[in-house]
Image (spheres, helix red, strand yellow):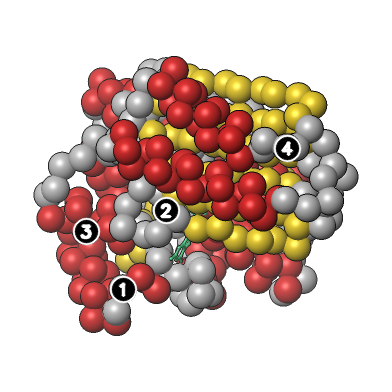
Amino acid sequence: MQHTKLILIGGFLGAGKTSLMARAARVLKGQGKTVGLITNDQASDLVDTAFLSDQENEVREVSGSCFCCNYPGFADAVDDLTEKTHCDITLAEPVGSCTDLSATIMQPTKDKYAQVIDLAPLTVLADPERLRAILDGVYSTASYIITKQFDEADIILVNKVDLLNDDEAAELQARAQEHWPHAQVLVASVKEGTGIEEWLAAVQTASRAGQNLAVVDYDEYAAGEAAYGWLNLTYALGKAEAGYAEAAQSLLDALVAGFQEKGVGVGHVKFLLQGSAHAWVGNFTGGAEPSMLRVEEQESEEYSLTVNARAEMMPLSLEKLVVRAVNAAVEGFEVTDIRVRVLIPGRPNPTYRYDEVI
Ligand SMILES: Nc1nc2c(ncn2[C@@H]2O[C@H](COP(=O)(O)OP(=O)(O)OP(=O)(O)O)[C@@H](O)[C@H]2O)c(=O)[nH]1
Ligand SMILES: [Mg+2]
């Protein structure tokens, strides 16, 4: 029977989960391992899936519901990667606004799939600014969910330490370790590639996983998730010889200006503009970290723009803001198909919810 090591990477919107999966996959493939990746969202047309697939990764997407509310879909994705692709290691990224993963994913997996899945510790990625706000007791709409994510973590990985000096990073790590003594607190910069090997060693060698359960009030959890409007948009474009770079920059500028003008909390706004030989990836997480536009070397037959936006707005206002920015940016491109989906995440209703550690 095929067997896989399953590494679940949680953490709030924009903490760096997809970036970590991409980098960890490169490191592991370099060591000769076969790696599978699983993305997750409330709706289809994901920037994360397109971005990871373009890097020659084997990716499965569980969309339409979070892993916890569609455990069979999650289990099928793991099974498919294990049986068809023979992945030694599977990395999975749950929706960033999800929590209670220890009770709803980790424990059922240990209970039902111990023969085929070797479960690694639950890693929760932390954005330093959001982590510091929690430790300082600064309230935000996201506080409840983020706190619960850390409460249930086996490993808290403080990411983006390139944005801090060494003393700040050490202080934040020590404060987090004191606050969550049950977890192992590590630091990393996925961007610069530091701390990744240490984290991979920790998740691959640990003998126990899913050791902590958080006490989660589902009314408060649901209210925290419902504060965010969710938009997934895809435009299919006709081939153009040039103009992608300008369109990407103008879209990022318009999105950042639009959200800043509204003064709303941003979870994560991201897009992937796929041209003929390159792809442009735009990210805006709303915090102190600047918005980013990266160019990736990618050949593709498809010319498309995918935008995923999660912000504290009603869906229709969110749609108006994003569609206006997109239409201005792609003016001059032939647009052959448009799909726009907006929603507010529904109340979480997990398939399984264990009340004790297996
Ligand atoms: N400075 C810095 N930025 C980073 C680092 N890791 C990721 N980022 C940036 O953080 C932003 C969000 O990264 P993602 O990997 O998309 O985050 P995510 O957790 O998958 O986000 P969601 O899927 O929306 O929840 C992007 O702009 C990344 O480039 C890091 O180590 N340092
Ligand atoms: Mg992601």
Q: Which is in the foreground here, disc 1 or disc 4?
A: 4
Please state the horizontal and vertical placement of residue 189, each as a whole percent of the image.
45, 70
**Chain-order first, disc 4 or disc 3:** 3
**Chain-order first, disc 2 or disc 4:** 2
Q: CA distance from mark 2 to mark 1?
A: 15 Å
Q: CA distance from mark 3 to mark 1?
A: 12 Å
Disc 2 C-beta below 8 A from ligand 1: yes
Q: In the image, which disc is placed on residue 164?
A: 1
Q: Which is in the foreground here, disc 3 or disc 1?
A: 1
Instruction: Judge left or right: residue 274 versus residue 105.
Output: right
Q: Secondary structure at mark 1?
A: loop
Q: Which residue is mark 3?
A: 132
> Within 10 angstroms of label 4, few (less than 14), some, or many (20 or more) residues?
few
Q: CA distance from mark 2 to mark 4?
A: 34 Å
**Picture layout, residue 108 above or below residue 248:** above
Which residue is painted at 30% across and 44% down in the image? Answer: 146
**Picture layout, residue 300 above or below residue 44:** below
